[in-house]
Image (spheres, rainbow, N blue to C red):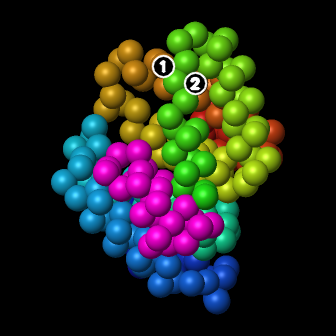
Amino acid sequence: MIRFEDLLEKVRAYSPDADVELLRRAYVFSAFEHRGQVRHSGEPYLIHPLAVADFLADMKLDVVAVAAGLLHDVVEDTLTTIERIKELFGPEVAHVVEGVTKISAIRFASSEERQAENFGKMLLAMARDIRVILIKLADRVDNMRTLQHMPREKQERISRETREIYAPMANRLGIQWMKVELD
């Protein structure tokens, strides 16, 4: 399990001038908003945004992306609004979090519909800001690592979606380690 201080150390190693206060505020806010929430595995929910942020730091993404990784589920899973994120973390972080939130909200009935429409919307989001796609891919990798804790039907739906949409997207972006793990 990644610790926040380990994440800061990793970011500082590739970006010595990074705004670590932004990361610290994002971490504290995420911890506060997700307090009491647990994953299907029984672990505290905060483990997930930390893992996502860690993947982003492994890819050496900028501090905005890492902060958005820490905050990526706050709007979707709590009463926090995107306006609040903008107010506290600025328009750039809010833009990225909002993009991830919108992609996460896409649900489709059939595999064909899900693949075609999701792929198109993801490409559109990617054209605006690649960090949105990278955060969503990191989110999916971490979710796949704990898939065994989900009900069987949900495991199958998420696995199909991952195989049809997210693994090919990682491949198209040239992130081979991620494509292999998602497959």
The amino acid at mark 2 is: Glu
From the viewer's perspective, is residue 57 above or below residue 14?
Answer: above
From the viewer's perspective, is residue 67 above or below residue 22?
Answer: above
Query: Who is closer to the viewer here, 181 or 39?
Result: 39
Label 1 secondary element: helix
Residue at position x 46%, y 18% in the image: 156
Query: Who is closer to the viewer here, 6 or 172?
Result: 172
Contact? badges 1 and 2 (CB < 8 Å) = yes
Residue 77 in magenta?
yes
**Residue holding disc 2:** 161
Span shown in magenta: 70-94
Give the left or right position of residue 154, taking residue 181 as reference: left
Quarter of the picture holding the N terminus = bottom left
From the viewer's perspective, is residue 28 above or below residue 165?
Answer: below
Q: Residue furthest left?
A: 36
Residue at position x 36%, y 18% in the image: 152
Write down the quadrant of residue 108 in the picture.
top right
Give the left or right position of residue 38, taking residue 122 as reference: left
